[in-house]
Image (cartoon, rainbow, N blue to C red):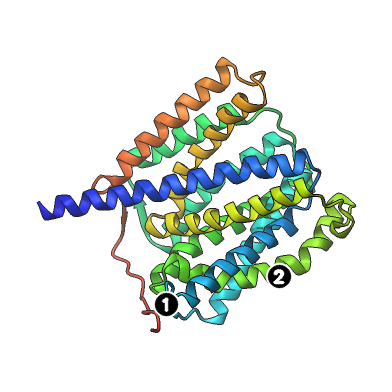
Amino acid sequence: MAPASKADKKAAVDAAAWMFNVVTSVGIIIVNKALMGTYGFSFATTLTGMHFATTTLMTIILKMLGYVQHSHLPLPDLLKFVVFANFSIVGMNVSLMWNSVGFYQIAKLSMIPVSCLLEVVLDKIRYSRDTKLSIGVVLLGVGVCTVTDVSVNTRGFVAAFIAVWSTSMQQYYVHYLQRKYSLSSFNLLGHTAPAQAASLLLLGPFLDYWLTNTRVDRYDYNTASMIFIFLSCTIAVGTNLSQFICIGRFTAVSFQVLGHMKTILVLIMGFFFFGKEGLNLHVVFGMVIAVVGMMWYGNASSKPGGKERRSHSLPTNKTET
């Protein structure tokens, strides 16, 4: 009875973590779409720096209140993580700017096989046949409902390549560092958020000016836009935390595969709030395929042998208390 209760409790916590990530991720997409589309705040990198500054403030307050214990993360590991994370943010922004929407979506989908490759090579993970096929079904479904026009150019391909690999490495490192140093999600955020906030707030205005030819200090700040910036930063705290929680509890591959449910929800909510002209049989068919693939993946990867480590253990270092 006890093992069943423990399994039920874990399943409930897992579901809550996923719901937390889905709600905050979809929420921040909607808020940022309004902020950038309606109010013209097109400074994506600087805004991300604000997100991490707000997250840093949250971790400082929690430490002061005693909810987050002292922990240790070696500087070389911190620097590697920040490099991967910042290249991910900048790469995705530049990729969206330089590529067609179709190729940008293909690049996002390619993060799943890249994350699989990283787990196979670095963690010696072995996937069952059903797990591999279910991932393929998810890729097919999301591709059908999101990929439309596809055109590629050299600089856009390079930006997408950097974005895909840096994002995959960043997400792999979230799981890796939490396991190696026995860090909680709050602990890891407490180490990484300040470094990301400082670097992005320093470089963001220059990068945004390069991409948009507009200076962030010349933006016409008003009450409405400031409210949306505040909402974006507040929701981002939950988005950053939930990402670390989900990847820590699962893996980067599971986060990517099941995370495409957010893509489906954003499409549905977009049709509901912003018009139904894009809602057609082709898109609905792709959504159905993707959801079936996600359900199959969840079932296949949880079975014995669905996704297992081949006699390889990662040395861990306990956090300092």
Q: Please tell me how many numbered marks the rendered image carries.
A: 2
Q: Nearer the viewer, residue 265 or 35?
A: 35
Dot 1: what SS?
A: loop
Residue in the image at 47% along x and 81% along y: 72
| Residue 129 at least partly seen | no
Q: Tell me if 128 is positioned left or right of 208 in this view.
A: left
| In this rendering, the label closer to the viewer, 1 or 2 | 1
| Residue 108 at least partly seen | yes
Disc marking residue 234: none
Q: Quadrant of residue 181?
A: bottom left
Which residue is tagged 2?
Answer: 199
Q: Nearer the viewer, residue 62 or 198?
A: 62
Q: Residues within 10 Å of mark 1 (few under 14, many from 20)?
A: some
Residue in the image at 31% along x and 40% along y: 300
Q: Tell me if 96 is positioned left or right of 316 in this view.
A: right
Residue in the image at 63% along x and 31% along y: 147
Q: Most extreme residue toward the top, as rendered?
A: 281
Q: Amino acid at mark 1?
A: Gln
Which tag, 1 or 2, sits closer to the chain's start?
A: 1
| x and y percentages locating residue 143 in the rendered image | 57, 32
Q: Quadrant of residue 268?
A: top right
Q: Tell me if 228 is positioned left or right of 55 in this view.
A: right
| x and y percentages locating residue 100 in the rendered image | 74, 36
Disc marking residue 69: 1
Q: Is residue 317 above or below residue 275?
A: below
Q: Most extreme residue toward the front, as rendered?
A: 223
Q: Nearer the viewer, residue 5 or 246?
A: 5
Q: Nearer the viewer, residue 289 or 205?
A: 205
Residue in the image at 33% along x and 38% along y: 130
Q: Amino acid at mark 2?
A: Ser
Q: Is residue 211 above or below residue 186?
A: above
Dot 2: what SS?
A: helix
